[in-house]
Amino acid sequence: MSDHIPGSSAVDNGHSTRFWLTIAAVLVLVQIVTLALMGRIPICECGYIKLFEPGVNTAGNSQHIADWYTPSHIIHGFLFYGLAKLVLPRAPVGARLTLSILVEAAWELLENSPIIIDRYRNATMAVGYTGDSILNSAMDTVAMVLGFLFAARAPVWLTVAIAIGFEIVTAIVIRDNLTLNVLMLVWPVEAVKAWQAAL
């Protein structure tokens, strides 16, 4: 005799979704609180909030809601979705999303540590980089979540096409993108650095 109760699967799925969303929200909150404890400023020192900061080597870069590096964080979401689906094929989407938020939040904390800030300033085009505002860092995580959710629903070919489009556009506009950012952090190439500096 089965213990299955009609409609119980839907109820269980609802509880599971709420559980993972709660954990995800807590992780973002921990990210924000930790950044504050690290001494990061809440918003841009300019005292106002912009929807989009178009300048790259400006005091407002990485301080507002979005900037030219936002597409990189959306691509993080694409990549995390694909990796989580590959590694945890049976896990609910909420669990995979929560794991992705954990990784993204951990990166955001590392990215705003003195060692990575110095690495950016010395090895990449971000000569004047001083770290993200808490607002910008939190919105980077939100951008990752949006990328993850898009990849969860869109065809693979469309997700890949958008990622390539983002990389091409940002390479043309600011001479930087996720690929170049990772390259210059891990294995700086002087020719690339010179090309980026000529912007």
Image (tube, grey):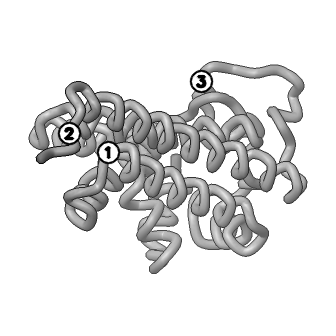
Mark 1 residue type = Val
Give the Cα separation between the discs numbered 2 and 3: 51 Å
- How many C-alpha atoms fall within 10 Å of the one at disc 1: few (<14), some, or many (≥20)? many
Question: Residue 140, percent across and down?
Answer: 56, 41
Q: Are marks 1 and 3 in contact (CB under 8 Å)?
A: no
Question: Which mark lies nearer to you, 2 or 3?
Answer: 2
Query: Residue at coordinates 50% horizontally, 65% vertically from top-left?
Result: 193
Question: Residue 197, percent across and down?
Answer: 55, 56
Give the Cα separation between the discs numbered 1 and 2: 23 Å
132 with respect to 75 (left or right): right
Q: Secondary structure at mark 3?
A: strand
Residue at image mark 1: 93
Using the image, tell me which numbered label, if any, was put on residue 43. none
Q: Secondary structure at mark 1?
A: helix
> Which circle's residue, 1 or 3, is located before the other in the chain?
3
191 with respect to 129 (left or right): left
Q: Residue furthest bottom?
A: 187
Image quarter for residue 153? top left
Using the image, tell me which numbered label, if any, was put on residue 4. 2
Q: Does residue 59 appear in this view? A: yes
Residue at image mark 3: 52
Query: Which residue is nearer to you in this view: 182 or 96?
Result: 96
Mark 3 residue type = Phe
